[in-house]
Amino acid sequence: MIRLEDVCRYFDVGDEVVHALDHVTVEIPDGEYVSIMGPSGSGKSTLLNILGLLDTPSSGSYSLDGVNTSTMDDAELAHVRQQKIGFVFQSFHLVPRLSALENVELPMVLAGDQPTARQERGMAALNRVGLGHRDDHRPSQLSGGERQRVAIARAIVMQPTLLLADEPTGNLDSASGKEVVKIMEDLNQQGLTLLVVTHDPAIGERARRQLKFRDGRLAEDSARVA
Amino acid sequence: MQTRDLLRFTAVSALSHRLRSALTALGIGIGVTAVVLLTSIGEGLHEFMIAEFTQFGTNIVAINPGVQETFGASAAVLNTERPLSIDDAEALRRVPQVLGTIPAVQGNASVEGNGRERRVIISGVGPDMPEIFRFKVALGEFLPDDDPRAPRAFAVLGSKVRDELYGDLNPLGERIRIGGDRYRVIGVMESKGTILGMDLDDAVYIPAARGLEIFNRESLMEIDVLYAEGASVEEVKEGIRRVLLARHGGEDFTITTQQQMLDVLGSVLNVVTFAVGALGSISLLVGGVGIFTIMTIAVRERTFEIGLLRALGALRGQVRAIFIGESILLAGIGGLTGLLLGLLVVESLKLLFPAMPASYSVPYAIAAESLALVIGLIAGVWPAQRAARMDPVDALRAE
Ligand SMILES: Nc1ncnc2c1ncn2[C@@H]1O[C@H](COP(=O)(O)OP(=O)(O)OP(=O)(O)O)[C@@H](O)[C@H]1O
Ligand SMILES: [Mg+2]
């Protein structure tokens, strides 16, 4: 359960203050499928970074599963990211030196898991995105769609409850984009809370709930209109 | 994160830029090679000098006139009040545990024999010299046990003097002239080689009392005392001191044990070895700068990866460990390469120049490798700290 209350995020740029997020209040229950849309610079990525505990609000409060995140220190935030949150980025962010399986295992390596457990769960995650047969390929030997699917496998290998995707199809052709969205929707079907930032209305409309941002403000929330 | 995973991750990262990592490691490697090479030569020199000194045996005490702080300060010889005499040397024979003494005086003079002439070292000694200095007679006999104050004019030739003056002829019984006096050759020494630049084979050995006459001296330059194996050096020293104090009425002499000489020599050579080792370490420092540069570049290149690691739950400390680990790994591998390279160079030097003293010094090799690791650590700290301090959002945005 995500609860944002009056969240603002300001950036000082020279003499000016940019209101990347401006008094955002929103609640997202577990298992929800949410798309986040809005023009460039409207604060979508900033919101996702705050939800993913990579960034902290300038004011307002964010509580995740009933815990106020502003009370957490660096190590606790890292632990929550590791256990509860999966990230999918527009440019995949795979480590080029590691094989597909090793990239998927990376969160477990950081968590200090044993190699046998890692291999098992890593392969299971790769199979889930349909890439079990590409486990020893380097990112450079995979297509864009395949790379993003490896990134999704990496995001879910720790069995998080929240998947945050920032323009996951932005670098993909529409066919592989659809495939990637389909995989994430399947995961959502199995209970994962899914938040997707997108510029593509066709993808945005597939979500059960749609948030639209403008100038850092939550301009439209399909749940509230309904 | 488990240690072996950290190692694997850093190794994979280092291997992803093979050439660059190899060159960086080589910088450290050359430093370690320099340390190994220089200290091996220093250590070889050390062993060579010790061997030079101990070839005379180790149970020897030397007595010099004057009060000296360390051996070799011969300036102090000049202001002695009651110089060492042949009678002193005789008296010291009666000190408990003393097996023999050599009254010694030395100088250069020309020798004529068999119609030839040669400038050699003239060594005035006593009949105990072969035993005390482990210096064997090859032909004939050594100086007899004459009255030390009025010995007969006998001479024993060093092997080189014999070769130069007599060639293959038998010199025994021949007459030679030294400084105007006539001597009869009664023996020839075995070849002993040189010690500290002094050719013992290019010398003629005559009784000390006659040496004093030739060089127009009142007193001896040194008395060497051989004591029994297993006797306490301190007791022997004390016995010598008591006898000389009684004869001189004051402490106007210096007693130096072989061990003291070795200690002083050893500490001088240790300083030399340490100094050349330190010189070699400077190239290690240069290698450290190379690692620092490469690690700084690596942090910049892998910025998104740092953000990614943080997003995947890595602590700042883990990010720091990954980069410091890589830095230490580069230095460690470079160091090991340097050790091998150093070993190779030392061994080939020994093959090429058998006379050159070189001896692989294990403690310095270990010190060099440890220093390499420490330099890797230090070189990695700043770049790794920069990586650990990065804001994950900023890092992820970097392309
Ligand atoms: N670190 C920062 N420093 C200064 N300004 C920032 C920073 N991060 C974001 N901003 C500003 O905040 C605003 C919102 O940025 P954000 O990246 O959230 O937009 P976005 O909706 O994701 O846009 P896009 O669709 O182009 O990705 C922008 O005006 C941006 O310039
Ligand atoms: Mg964005």
Image: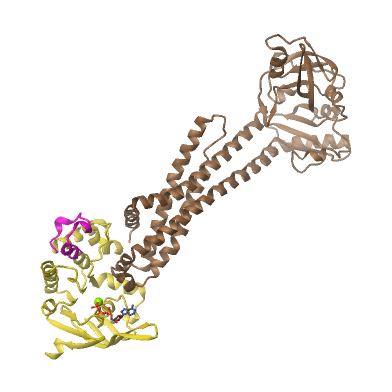
Chain colours: A yellow, B brown
Q: Residue at x 52, y 45 (%)?
A: B35
Q: Is residue B372 above or below residue B220?
A: below
Q: Could you say where residue B135 lies in the image, as x and y percent from the top left?
A: 69, 22
Q: Is residue B387 above or below residue B147?
A: below
Q: Quadrant of residue B68?
A: top right
Viewed as shown, does residue B217 lie left or right of B260?
right
Q: Is residue A135 magenta?
A: yes
Q: Could you say where residue A14 lies in the image, as x and y percent from the top left?
A: 39, 82
Q: Is residue B2 visible?
A: yes
Viewed as shown, does residue A217 lie left or right of B297?
left
Q: Quadrant of residue A106?
A: bottom left
Please state the quadrant of the image where ligand 2 appears: bottom left
Q: Is residue B183 above or below residue B103?
A: above
Q: Could you say where residue B66 lies in the image, as x and y percent from the top left?
A: 83, 39
Q: Could you say where residue B94 lies in the image, as x and y percent from the top left?
A: 80, 28
Magenta-tinted stretch: A129-150
